[in-house]
Amino acid sequence: MNRLAALLLVSLTSPAAADTPPLAGSALDRAVSGRRIYLATPLGGEFPMNYYRDGRLDAQGEASGLGRFARPQDSGRWWVDGSRLCQKWTSWYEGRIFCFVLRPVDEKRLAWERDDGLSGIARIGDERP
């Protein structure tokens, strides 16, 4: 599952976003808290993740593209640490903590870079109940 999850989550970062300061603190929290965030996948489609206001995180395998067939799903926790969005899945990545720097691309997209160097683009969805 780890290889599949990694394949689904990797895409190319927008060069313009590299010049934008990263989101931090309450601005970073507001960008993801209570929202569904869609990660662009390299084979087409998007992979949705839910960032609940209480710090819970889940992905239910509703992805389009390749994710429709693999139907990966997991849950975990997320939190903001300064200018980093951190998350820990229950089983994906063997429960390892990963943190991300997020930079706005435009009003609905974020460029992300994970602490291991992987990067990509995410689309900010509407708020969820």
Image (cartoon, rainbow, N blue to C red):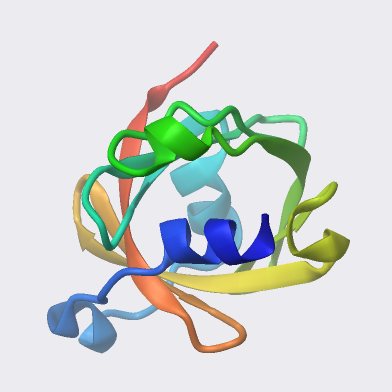
Q: Is residue 112 visible?
A: yes
Depicted 1 relative to depicted 129: above or below: below
Compare residues 93 and 56 and report the one nearer the observer.
Answer: 93
Depicted 10 relative to depicted 64: above or below: below
Compare residues 30 and 15 and report the one nearer the observer.
Answer: 15
Q: Is residue 37 visible?
A: no
Residue lying at 76% horizontally and 30% vertically, measured from the top left: 54
Residue lying at 82% horizontally and 50% vertically, measured from the top left: 91
Residue lying at 26% horizontally and 80% vertically, measured from the top left: 20
Residue 28 at what x, y percent from top left? 52, 57
Residue lying at 46% horizontally and 64% vertically, measured from the top left: 7
Q: Image quadrant for the N terminus?
A: bottom right
Q: Identify the residue at the far top of this view.
A: 129
Residue 74 at what x, y percent from top left? 72, 38
Residue 11 at what x, y percent from top left? 31, 69
Q: Quadrant of residue 52?
A: top right
Asked whether, in this view, residue 79 is left or right of residue 48, the answer is right
Q: Image quadrant for the C terminus?
A: top right
Q: Quadrant of residue 126?
A: top left
Depicted 115 relative to depicted 85: above or below: below
Q: Quadrant of residue 104?
A: bottom left
Q: Identify the residue at the far front of this view.
A: 69
Q: How many marks?
A: 0
Residue 72 at what x, y percent from top left? 59, 39
